[in-house]
Image (spheres, rainbow, N blue to C red):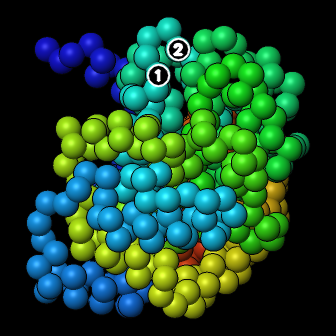
Amino acid sequence: MLAKRMSRLGTETAFEVLARARAMEATGKEIIHLEIGEPDFDTPRNIVDAATRALHDGCTHYGPSAGLPEARKAFADFITKDRGLDVGPENIVITPGAKPILFFSILALAAAGDEVIYPDPGFPIYESVINFAGATPVPLPLIEDRGFSFDPERLKALVTPRTRLIILNSPQNPTGGMLTRADFRLAADLAAAHDAWILSDEVYSKMIYEDSYVSIYSCPDAKDRTILLEGHSKTYAMTGWRLGYGVMPAELAQQIAKLQTNCTSCTPGFTQIAGIEALNGPQEESERMMAEFKARRDVIVDGLNAIPGFRCLRPKGSFYVFPNITQTGWGSDRLASALLESAGVAVLSGTCFGRHGEGYLRLSFANSRQNIAKALGKISEFIHKAGKSA
Ligand code: PLP
């Protein structure tokens, strides 16, 4: 028998849909993949070369749990320059991907009796890990009419003396929305008033299309109660390398590093060396990737808005769109399944991201413009043929 806590652990449905889509492909069906959240580009060559050099130089041993000193310094220097607040190596913990920072932070800060506020629709791992830690998940609805920001009054109403942690994410998975300075300000004030922590998931900070980026560090007073989450997976097409980091007060960094000692020991050294090159080396390839994402965004948004019953905001960041499909008459889960089974297009139901995702689908535009156009044609054809679901 499994430990009871396992029944509280959720998952990322994207991986299940991907498995189903791959099984269909194995039977000869053509599937267009718009379900998975990873850049379809290769990691830039200079980053791969830096890792290869490090491997040849013998960077193949255990390293410090919090990260290599030179990588902690480089990541701290990057944050200081990029976000405009001074942080040092002692504030950085480097992990295999951004996800472990979520896992470790929630485990370190929240337990039974504590409440954790998190965005809904939001990255499903938040709710899963809050539950796993035995804390109470408190969803903060994101609202389409507000560009997928939250209602300030709602956040105020959700914060209680039991609130231990407020999770924010901007740009957002799955909506592509971004929070404003006022949103961060309110969260920072509420966290201070209730002596709570903030976890600001900023892994898409460099994947933005229009507005300049606003970070939780736009509220300098929040720094001492904040874990800022960053990573290389999305910006540098390094999902499979597993490289992310948290920026936090030094005392908390020591505790998070202790969790890492107990779990993975450390992040591979050559990956961290590659991560330094990513931040300090030429940025042209990453910029080219973003220009292509922007072109794809416009193709997918315009295409979806031309389909009867679909209404799609133009995302300000990330590589996701989150169209409202209520006017099609279909529920989200049924439409996502039907599109996979009947149209050969793999997308995710909005409910994979929480109950406030009902009425929406999530499509990733990490696929070629040609495939996106083809998928749009198939979705449109399906909707025209199937009409309203009876
Ligand atoms: N946070 C958000 C909002 C994400 O969308 C993801 C990945 O999809 C992560 C964190 C995890 O990133 P990583 O692959 O670096 O662990």
- Of the 4 image quadrants, the one containing the N terminus is top left
Specify whether 76 is left or right of 210.
left
Q: Quick check: 372 above or below 390?
A: below
Distance (Cα) linking label 2 and label 1: 6 Å
**Residue at the spot 61% in from the left edge and 59% down from the top edge:** 86
Image mark for residue 110: 1
Q: Which residue is mark 2?
A: 114
Measured as percent of width and height from the top left, residue 296 is found at 67, 76
Q: Nearer the viewer, residue 261 or 138?
A: 261
Which secondary structure lies at badge 1?
Answer: loop
Q: Three-letter amino acid code at disc 1?
A: Ala
CB under 8 Å between discs 2 and 1: yes
Mark 2 Cα shell of 10 Å, populated few (<14), some (14-19), many (≥20): some
Specify whether 310 is left or right of 18.
right
- Of the 4 image quadrants, the one containing the C terminus is top right
Q: Three-letter amino acid code at disc 2?
A: Asp
Whether ligand 1 has any atom under 8 Å from the Cβ at mark 1 is answered as: no
- In which quadrant of the rendered view does residue 12 lie? top left
Whether residue 343 appears in this view of the structure is no
**Residue at the spot 31% in from the left edge and 52% down from the top edge:** 66
Q: Nearer the viewer, residue 247 or 296?
A: 247
Q: Quick check: 226 above or below 372?
A: above
Measured as percent of width and height from the top left, residue 40 is found at 46, 75
Residue at the top extreme of this rendering: 113
Number of callouts in the render? Answer: 2
**Residue at the spot 30% in from the left edge and 18% down from the top edge:** 5
Q: Quick check: 45 above or below 330?
A: below
